[in-house]
Image: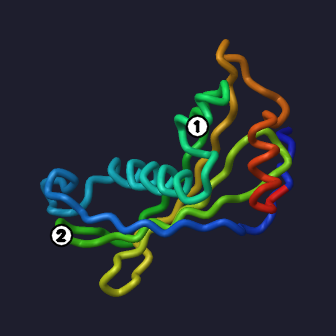
Amino acid sequence: MAKKVKRQAPSLINRTPLRVRFSEVDSMQIVWHGEYVRYFEDGREAFGRQYGGLGYMEMYNSGYVVPLVKINLEFKYPLVCGDTAIVETRYISCEAAKIIFEYTIYRESDMQVVATGESTQVFLNRDNVLELVNPEFYIQWKKKWGVE
């Protein structure tokens, strides 16, 4: 039986607007489902810039890679070419050696929720070995932002 991870309510949030491009829609003229995973990544990257220290290259330069090991996505309403989406990325603090984000994607014109989701990343050291405890840089990042 999997151990339940103790989680706290989200406290750090980033909101990033994204313009839906023609190349992101499918033959039905709606955003292809795979693009939403990319939108989540855009949200994570913007989050990392806003709350310095969790950018991909910053973590890499600290000696770690942080691959996705789990992603959930639920579609609510479609986006179409020309829409502006707002990706809301919420950091979920937990005690385990992982990074969890929750997402809500809104259509900017009416603030309709079009998709929700969650992702989990883990820490691998430079030898690609899974870290079972939080790396020091991540402990310090959590202290800095008050999400210990």
**SS assignment at label 1:** helix
Nearest the viewer among 52 and 104 is 52
Quadrant location of residue 69? top right
Residue 67 is situated, as x and y percent measured from the top left of the image, at 58, 32
- Residue 115, above or below 55: below
Q: Across the whole image, how many numbered discs are drawn on residues?
A: 2
Residue at coordinates 30% horizontally, 69% vertically from top-left? 78
Nearest the viewer among 72 and 98 is 98
Q: Are marks 1 and 2 in contact (CB under 8 Å)?
A: no
Q: Residues within 10 Å of mark 2 (few under 14, many from 20)?
A: few
Left/right placement of residue 16 relative to residue 137 reads: left
Residue 147 is situated, as x and y percent measured from the top left of the image, at 80, 60
Residue 34 is situated, as x and y percent measured from the top left of the image, at 34, 47
Q: Amino acid at mark 2?
A: Gly
Residue beneath disc 1:
58
Quadrant location of residue 29? bottom left
Residue beneath disc 2:
82
Q: Tell me the number on the disc at residue 73.
A: none
**SS assignment at label 2:** loop
Nearest the viewer among 33 and 15 is 15
